[in-house]
Image (cartoon, helix red, strand yellow):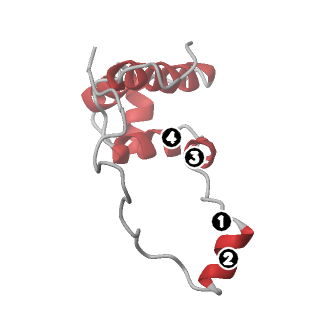
C-alpha cells in the first residue's frame, strides 16, 4: 500500500482508499457480497469503492461501518484544533464563517484533481 501524500492525484488517492477498504475486508475474511449487504449498498457499488472509482462519502462511511472501522474516520478528519489566542478572540463563541481571503487569490490552492 502507498502512503497518501500531497503529490498524489485525486484518482490515485481514491484508488489507495479502495485498496485499504479491500484490505480491511480481507483481514476479516469477509466476502464483498456480505459486506455490501451489511452496508446496505449494492455489490457493484462496493466493488467500485474498492476499485477507487469515485465512491461517495456516504458509501465509504457505510462500508467502514459494516467493517467495524468507523474509527478510521477520526484519523481521516479529526476535530479541528483551536489555538488559545483564537479562543480568547472568540470569547467562548463558536466560529461559524470565514472572513475571506486577504491579499491572496481565492479558489484552488494547488489541489491535483486528475483522475489518473
Q: Residues within 10 Å of mark 3 (few under 14, many from 20)?
A: some
User: Distance between the Cα atoms at labels 1 and 4?
Assistant: 28 Å
Residue 58 higher or lower than 97, as above or below: above
Query: First in sequence: mark 3 or mark 1?
Result: 3
Residue 45 higher or lower than 57, as above or below: above
Residue beneath disc 3: 70
Q: Residues within 10 Å of mark 2 (few under 14, many from 20)?
A: few
User: Distance between the Cα atoms at labels 2 and 4?
Assistant: 34 Å
Mark closer to the observer (3, 1):
1
Residue beneath disc 4: 64
Q: Residues within 10 Å of mark 1 (few under 14, many from 20)?
A: few
Residue beneath disc 1: 82
Give the image location of residue 25, x and y in percent.
53, 25
Say if mark 4 contacts mark 3, CB within 8 Å: yes
Query: In the drawing, what numbered circle is on residue 87?
Result: 2
Secondary structure under tag 1 reads loop
Say if mark 2 contacts mark 3, CB within 8 Å: no
Residue 66 higher or lower than 34, as above or below: below
Pick whichever, 99 or 7, lies toward us: 99
Pick whichever, 22 or 6, lies toward us: 6
User: Distance between the Cα atoms at labels 1 and 2?
Assistant: 7 Å
Amino acid at each position: 500500500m502507498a502512503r497518501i501524500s500531497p503529490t498524489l492525484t485525486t484518482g490515485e488517492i481514491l484508488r489507495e482508499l479502495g485498496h485499504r477498504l479491500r484490505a480491511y475486508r480481507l483481514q476479516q475474511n469477509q466476502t464483498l457480497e456480505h459486506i455490501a449487504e451489511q452496508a446496505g449498498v449494492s455489490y457493484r457499488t462496493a466493488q467500485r469503492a474498492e476499485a477507487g472509482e469515485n465512491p461517495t462519502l456516504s458509501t465509504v462511511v457505510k462500508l467502514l461501518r459494516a467493517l467495524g472501522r468507523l474509527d478510521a474516520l477520526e484519523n481521516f478528519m479529526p476535530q479541528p484544533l483551536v489555538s488559545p489566542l483564537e479562543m480568547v478572540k472568540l470569547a467562548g463563541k463558536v466560529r461559524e464563517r470565514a472572513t475571506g481571503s486577504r491579499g491572496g487569490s481565492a479558489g484552488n490552492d494547488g489541489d491535483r484533481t486528475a483522475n489518473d
